[in-house]
Image (spheres, coloured by chain):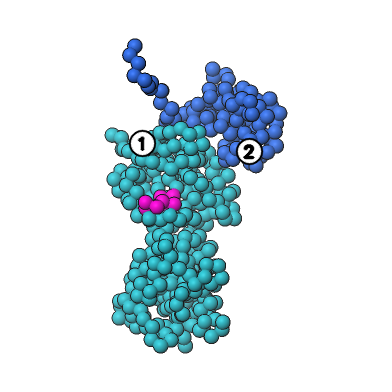
Chain colours: A cyan, B blue
Amino acid sequence: MKNIVVIGGGPAGLEASAQLHRLGYNVILVEKSPQLGGHLAKWDRLFPSGIPAKDVLEKMVSQINGVKYFLEANVQSINLLHKSYNVILNNGITVLADAVLFTTGFDLFPAQKKEEYGYGIYEKVITNADLENWFKTKKDNRVTENPKRIGFVHCVGSRDEKAGNRYCSKVCCATAVKQACEIKQEFPDVEVFCFYMDLRMFGRGYEDMYLSAQKDYGVRFIRGRVSEVAENINKELIVKAEDTLSGKPIKVTLDLLVLMSGMQNCSEGTKVAHQLGIANAGNDGFFETKDAIYSQQHSTREGIFFAGACTGPKTLPDSLSEARAAAIEIHNYVKGIR
Amino acid sequence: MVKFGFALNPSSRIDLDKTDREKFAQLVELEPDVLKCMACGSCTASCTAGKFTPTSVRSAILEIQNGRWQQALDMLKGCLLCGKCTMVCPRAINTRHLILAINEVYQSGK
């Protein structure tokens, strides 16, 4: 039986593992954290229709019966032996793999790097992940009852050369609009402001979500990037931006500011890729695929494959499609089909 | 008075803490579609009066959202109610009705 090692137990890793297992392979799934699901396990609801993340994850996990997976496991070393890869995990397990699939996903941009927004400095500045955690658990002292005004800052650590990430993280616009609507559901009287540069509502149902945010929830969209945040004596936030549509500076006092942290390549995944000489091929930090259009799942090395956000920011359905595509590509590769 | 060769202008900064939410709620009641504007500028580009006067529905909506309704009223003074903006609006806002609604809500507040 052929061995396939899948690195990363997020949505792409789970889906690819399930598919490869069904195709008759011996799948070994390696996950660094104590639970499966990656970022999805920390999310509450999903855009555009608000499906609970938990339901989607449960469905995925139920599909991996028979897949061997190791939690709190890292790839210690990986090297090529003749035609297969010798993968050694930190738990002492060694696998001789016929193919290796990277589904290492992304890290959220560390918002404290954008010092002017005050994450980690001012109490009432949180990130999209923090808010999602609050939706899920309702536990976070920074989110207080009866807020008057709440703001969302798009493109935090995205489209920002100084933050080191020139690219668009793709999913934050839709996430911001989703969270803005959800916060209005929680606090109907709150005034919500979204500070954006462009609203990238590319997917099916996203534009409807944007329209609904305006029409049904009265969310105010301000075209302009927040330039600085200060805190007053009452721990409220004084936010400055330009309303570029009127060409005038704007000031607003907020009770909560949510920073839409973008995606960057997973640092743990990059370390493993370094051993194979396939990391940092793309100038944006994400892994370089063999071909940008035709061979999205292939790396530049034989037998090494990619799926999901390790090759650039992706939505959840995008990652799942790539995982299924990767399973087929690996199957073709192992069978010697070109 | 000593002339320094420069003068200070009053601040042009918009303070969103001070916008009148009540009046805006009245406007939304009369014409809910005011919320749907995505600032594309089609209305302003097609405006007959806009070529000769500072008429702009897009800007007027923005001024109201920013609490500067007097500027919005001034901006709509030149409107001929020709309805071209209604025809071109991609969000299907009844701009003609919106202009009348803006006048109704904010003129009375003078």
Chain for disc number 2: B
**What residue do we see at 53% from left, 24% from top?**
B71
Horizontally, residue A183 falls left or right of residue B37, namely left
- Indicate the secondary structure of the residue bearing disc 1: strand
Q: Nearer the viewer, residue A336 or A72?
A: A336
- Mark carried by residue B42: 2
Say above or below: A23 vs A135. below
Counting labels gives 2
Residue placed furthest toward the top: B1
Q: Nearer the viewer, residue A113 or B29?
A: A113
Q: Nearer the viewer, residue B35 or A164?
A: A164
- Mark carried by residue A238: 1
Say above or below: A156 vs A83. above
Is residue A258 something one can see in this rendering?
yes
Say above or below: A306 vs B71. below
Region rendered in magenta: A155-163
**What residue do we see at 44% from left, 52% from top?**
A159
Q: Amino acid at mark 1?
A: Ile
Give coordinates of residue A107: x percent, y percent. Answer: 38, 61
Q: Is residue B82 magenta?
A: no
- Mark carried by residue A313: none
Does the magenta stretch mainly form a helix, a strand or a loop? loop
Give coordinates of residue B62: x percent, y percent. Answer: 53, 33
- Indicate the secondary structure of the residue bearing disc 2: helix
Chain for disc number 1: A
**What residue do we see at 28% from left, 34% from top?**
A233
Q: Quadrant of residue A80?
A: bottom left
